[in-house]
Image (cartoon, rainbow, N blue to C red):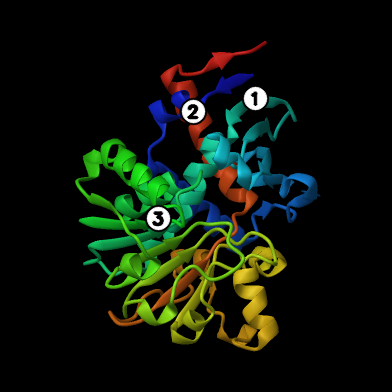
Amino acid sequence: MLLLSREDIKKVFTMKDAIEADKKAFQLVVEGKCDAPLRTNIQAPKHEGCFLFMPAYVEEMDTASLKIINIFPHNIDNGIPSSPAQVLLIDGKTGIVIAVLDGTYVTQLRTGAASGAAFDVLARKDARIGALIGTGGQAATQLEAMLAARDIKEVRVFDLNYDRTKEFADRMQEELASYGAKIVAAKTSDEAVEGADLLITVTPSSKPVFDASKVKEGAPISCVGAYQPHMQEMDPAILTRASKIYFDSKEAVLSESGDILIPLEQGTITEEDFTGDLGNVIKGELAGRENEEEIIVFETVGVATQDLVAARTIYDKAVEAGVGIEWN
């Protein structure tokens, strides 16, 4: 069994690799080729956290996986990841666990890459300014995915804690210097969002974190953080401005994301307003962007297929490169 740490993964797997892996995963979802039951969610109300178990199996890849990811938002206050995790990679021919991967990093990569895949497919080619709301454990890879998908010159970052936002922006300026973008801390959500060509929200908020009226025409919006029915980062008014609404998986989103469930319940939108899954666009079954003015919403809660495809790709690259620790 191969043990693969964050540093091992970094040696063999880039954000652009992660975006391509996610695009493959989203295609497998719409083709029905991945058996991935909806995640098991066990609440830990004492600590405002939850334990999530996400299995998946793709027969044509002879691969199964199980991700254990535990969401504890207050971890960020203690400087530890808010979503600690491991991914078990399983040989589909023998049932033997062949690798254990740093699931926190795999999750960060594949979750960021979901936004990257959406922007790769749906964003205007001339997008130059990005906005990122949230600076938690998932934020760095969301930012990198935005930079990997388009030639972005500036990203404005906003979080409720300005000192933390400034520290994050300064750190990202250094860590992502190779992309050549300017990373700046914004003092308000409006300051971040106004004029932005791309927008990502990645927070555990239960109330909207941006004003829909400030969103620029032509911008795609990727909403990432609302993984439970009470969570709502998205200003629901953006859904009535959007010409298309896409999901990583409609089934998964409708089972857990307050961003969509709350506006549905309130009658802001109906299911008739949904366009489909991103995998349908990747396969050429649905149109993506059809003009430069349309606002497009992408809601993602994550599906286990992403973990499986990413983990398998990382494992194959690691074996080829001789990276990782063998544990017998």
Residue at coordinates 29% horizontally, 40% vertically from top-left? 176
| SS at badge 1 | strand
Q: Position of residue 199 (x, y in %)?
A: 38, 65
| SS at badge 3 | helix
Image quarter hosting the C terminus: top right
Q: Which of 30/10 is in front?
A: 10
Q: Quadrant of residue 17?
A: top left
Question: In this view of the protein, can residue 150 be seen by the observer?
Answer: no
Q: Which residue is mark 3?
A: 116
Q: Earlier in the sequence, mark 2 or mark 3?
A: 2
Kind of residue sitting beneath label 2: Arg
Classify residue 96 as left or right of residue 321: right
Mark 1 or mark 3: which is in front?
3
Classify residue 174 as left or right of residue 142: left
Classify residue 189 as left or right of residue 48: left
Kind of residue sitting beneath label 3: Gly
Kind of residue sitting beneath label 1: Ile
Q: Residue furthest top?
A: 328
Q: Position of residue 300 (x, y in %)?
A: 55, 61
- Give the CA distance from mark 2 to mark 1: 17 Å
Q: Which residue is mark 2?
A: 6
Q: Earlier in the sequence, mark 2 or mark 1?
A: 2
Residue at coordinates 37% horizontally, 62% vertically from top-left? 119
Q: Which residue is mark 1?
A: 98
Classify residue 310 as left or right of residue 34: left
